[in-house]
Image (cartoon, rainbow, N blue to C red):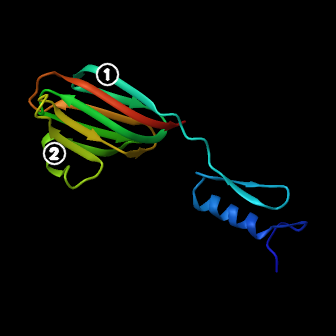
Amino acid sequence: MAFTTSPRSPLDPAELAALILAAEEGGRVAAELAPRGEARVAQPPPEEPLVYTMSRVRIPGEVLRVGGSGTLEELVILSLFSDYRVRVVSGGRVLLDAEWGELRAVSPFVTWISAYTDDETGFAVLGIGPLAFSGGLVVRAAPTRGRAAYLETVIAKLRVRG
């Protein structure tokens, strides 16, 4: 018995395989049906990365805000102090909420977090990513000792879809 999409058009096994692959990939790939019944899988074009570089970012406050869905490939924060907290929220869900010291303690064991003090520059360095998000992304930072402060440099590289 042949699989059919309608009583008039039999579905070729190669076409079926392409449609199954597209369904399993959750829309990340599209099945392209050729006129001769050959199936091809077309990858969507990659999103262009967005890169933000900010200097002297005042905290408490937002460090980064983007809409849509995508991947935070890398967020790097350079600071002359380590007494601050970072909170990352996406689609109303808290993805990360921790002090720099807590992140430093777990960074040897977690691949998407890196926190250390650079001996040469004296910067407290925090790296986060890659981290998938949907429903927007908001990164906030706040000093843990109550006073307003500045992060020396914030660099973010993202790929955003819609």
Tell me whether the residue at label 2 lies in contact with that at label 1, contact meaning CB atoms closer than 8 angstroms. Answer: no
What numbered label is drawn on residue 141? none
In depth, the one of 99 and 93 nearer the eye is 99
Report the residue at 15% width, 21% height from top: 148
Element carrying mark 1 = strand
Element carrying mark 2 = helix
Residue tagged 2: 104
Residue type at tag 2: Arg
Q: Position of residue 73 (x, y in %)?
A: 39, 41
**The N terminus is located in which quarter?**
bottom right
Residue 89 horizontal side relative to residue 123, left or right: right
Residue type at tag 1: Met
Report the residue at 19% width, 42% height from top: 115
Report the residue at 48% width, 40% height from top: 69
Q: Position of residue 162 (x, y in %)?
A: 54, 36
Q: Position of residue 20 (x, y in %)?
A: 66, 64
Report the residue at 11% width, 29% height from top: 122
Q: Residues within 10 Å of mark 2 (few under 14, many from 20)?
A: some
In the displayed structure, 121 sits above or below 23; it is above
In depth, the one of 53 and 19 nearer the eye is 53
Residue tagged 1: 54
